[in-house]
Image (cartoon, helix red, strand yellow):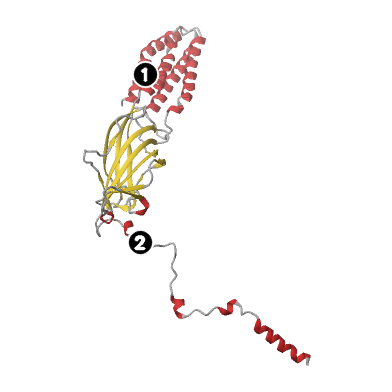
Amino acid sequence: MTNAFLPRLLVCFGLLLPVPVFAQEAAPGPAAAKSPLKSTLVEEAKPELKRPASPGEATEVQALIYVIDIDEINSADQSFAASVYYEARWNSPLLQHAGPGPLHVDLADIWNPRLTIIGQQNSWKSYPETAEILPDGTVIYRQKVWGHFSQPLNLHDFPFDRQELSIQLVAPGFSEKQVSMTPWVGELGRTSNLAPHFSLPDFDILSFEAKSAPYYPDQGPIGVAGYEMKIQVARQPEYYILKVILPLCLIVIMSWLPRWLNPEQSGTNIGISTSAFLTLVAYLFAITVLLPRISYITRIDRFIMLSTLTVFSGLIQTVTNTYLLKGESIQNKRLVAQLDFWSRILYPLILVAVIVISFVL
């Protein structure tokens, strides 16, 4: 009896247990299996984010660049530091409002050309990323940046060189057929310009030009929409004349002194020639920091090399004279006297030729 009652008790006890959760889940029906999944990260496109232009037409963006200051032009690093203000305007009929004053919105909430300056090494923006919307739908974006900008420089004529600095605004992601960058001219004639005075210590500003200029990152026929300001500058050479060229000329002249002394005073003559050459070598090490580190030869490099050869030739002549005067040969004494006589005329002419070859031709 006990054996027959035990199975019935277990069955009754099992009916009282809760049904497992997985047993309560219904099998997915046909409608549930066909419903597509939708990401929560993707939102419906807002009309304010669409480019304001008719199909097939470019959106006109009027741009203005105002250079507040240029702090330095670094010839060694091929860069310059500047403070730049730029402004862009475009019209979006969808953003027209009753006014009367302008609206201020985050730039990310409306369509914008995403302006940036080509060649930025590092920069800091002064204004928040906002836009001003006038009642007629005109959008105004203003920004001021300070930073270092890369600039390839042609230094073959250094330190008498002229350079062209480029500040180019581009609209990344928009070709010149999608966005047309044009100069903006205000009611009072305000347009792209330069500040009256810069803190640039060693360059003079010659002229500037601002115009629409697409940016071509590759050799393709269609460029990225852009607006560029080019500034022509000329280096002030007085610093290098006083710090490099004039001292080198004095060292070269110092190496001539044995030509005016008694050639038989060999110790004095060799001492002067050796001192001139060693002084030149030490001075070249000292002025290395003043010269641009580039792979090609500049005008001042040519002058330094020719000056070094001139001083070294004077040292060689002094040693030669000393060797010829070791004996008591009258013929050698006459030869040394003739060499010194012609050297007094030749060496100044050589220095003039070195200056002309280095800085004129």
Name the front one of labels 1 and 2: 2
Asked if residue 303 shows in the view, the reply is yes
Q: Disc 2 marks which residue?
A: 45
Asked if residue 326 shows in the view, the reply is no
Quick one: 51 or 289, which is closer to the camera?
Answer: 51
Quarter holding residue 31? bottom left
x%, y% of residue 78? 40, 36
- Gap between marks 1 and 2 measured at Cα: 75 Å
Q: Quadrant of the N terminus?
A: bottom right
Quick one: 181 or 189, which is closer to the camera?
Answer: 189
Give the structural element (helix, strand or loop) at label 2. Answer: loop
Give the structural element (helix, strand or loop) at label 1. Answer: helix
- What is the number of the mark on residue 235? none
Q: Disc 1 marks which residue?
A: 351
How many other residues sit within 10 Å of disc 1, few (<14), some (14-19) or many (≥20)? some
Mark 2: which amino acid?
Answer: Ala
Quick one: 131 or 164, which is closer to the camera?
Answer: 131
Q: Quadrant of the C terminus?
A: top left
x%, y% of residue 294? 42, 34
For marks 1 and 2, the one nearer the N-term is 2
Mark 1: which amino acid?
Answer: Leu
